[in-house]
Image (cartoon, rainbow, N blue to C red):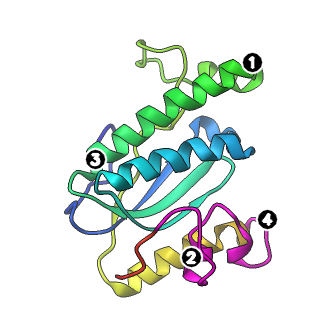
Amino acid sequence: MGRSRYKIVDPTLPHFVTCTVLHWIPVFTQPVTVEIVLNSLRYLMNEGLVIYAYVILENHLHLVVKSRQLDVDMRRFKSFTAKELIRHLKSRNVRQILDQLAFYKKAHKTDRAYQFWQEGFRPEWIQNEEMMRQKVNYIHENPVKRGYVDVPEHWRYSSARSYAGQGGLLDICMAW
């Protein structure tokens, strides 16, 4: 699970998790970078990851998820997406972002030139239905609070559309 001080209580229970780009660098500003994240999540869903809610913003994402091996799935997600996103940035020669990913990389990460994600994913066990509702609402309201949209379901990269009956980009589980 890395250096996170948060713990997975029971992987068979839902957890609220956050993944943040190193130094809050805005990388998810184009559909192609978000699609890398979505494709990785789709793959993990085929492997048993259950997603109850999600939002992807320009520099971080929130999920409510569960799986038999949540720590392993999150490690696989972050590793794969980091490699693919860095590959994408290199292919487009996005030097400004690549330079930042190299500059802010933790000193102990000597096996790589870049670090994409901040360490850990801060799993918080969803203890009851009230907490689940609060976390799902927090996720869906995130783009509204930032002033990007007026209503949650207008944010394309969120499960709010699914909860509003409009269909979304990921097949989420709304039975909790």
* Three-letter code, disc 3: Asp
Where does label 2 land, which residue? 162
Q: Residues within 10 Å of mark 2 (few under 14, many from 20)?
A: some
Q: Is residue 132 above or below residue 29?
A: below
Q: Quadrant of residue 50?
A: bottom left
Task: Indicate the quadrant containing the C terminus: top left, top right, bottom left or bottom right.
Answer: bottom left
Residue shown at the point (48%, 54%) measured from the top left: 18
Q: Is residue 154 above or below residue 91?
A: below
Residue shown at the point (65%, 68%) measured from the top left: 142
Q: Residues within 10 Å of mark 1 (few under 14, many from 20)?
A: few
Residue shown at the point (59%, 74%) measured from the top left: 167
User: Can I make out residue 20 in this image?
Assistant: no
User: Can I make out residue 12 in this image?
Assistant: yes
Report the Cα–Cα distance between label 4 and label 3: 31 Å
Residue 141 at x, y = what percent? 64, 74
Q: Nearer the viewer, residue 122 or 49?
A: 49
Residue mark closest to the camera, 2 vs 1? 2
Q: Pick whichever of labels 2 and 1 is earlier in the sequence.
A: 1
Q: Is residue 2 above or below residue 12?
A: above
Q: Pick whichever of labels 3 and 2 is earlier in the sequence.
A: 3
How many numbered dots are placed on residues in this image? 4
Residue 47 at x, y = what percent? 30, 51
Residue 71's disc number: 3
Q: Tell me the magenta residue range.
A: 146-171
* Three-letter code, disc 1: Asn
Residue shown at the point (69%, 49%) measured from the top left: 58
Residue 50's disc number: none
Q: Quadrant of residue 168?
A: bottom right
Residue 161 at x, y = what percent? 62, 75
Where does label 1 land, which residue? 93
Horizontally, residue 140 falls left or right of residue 134, namely right
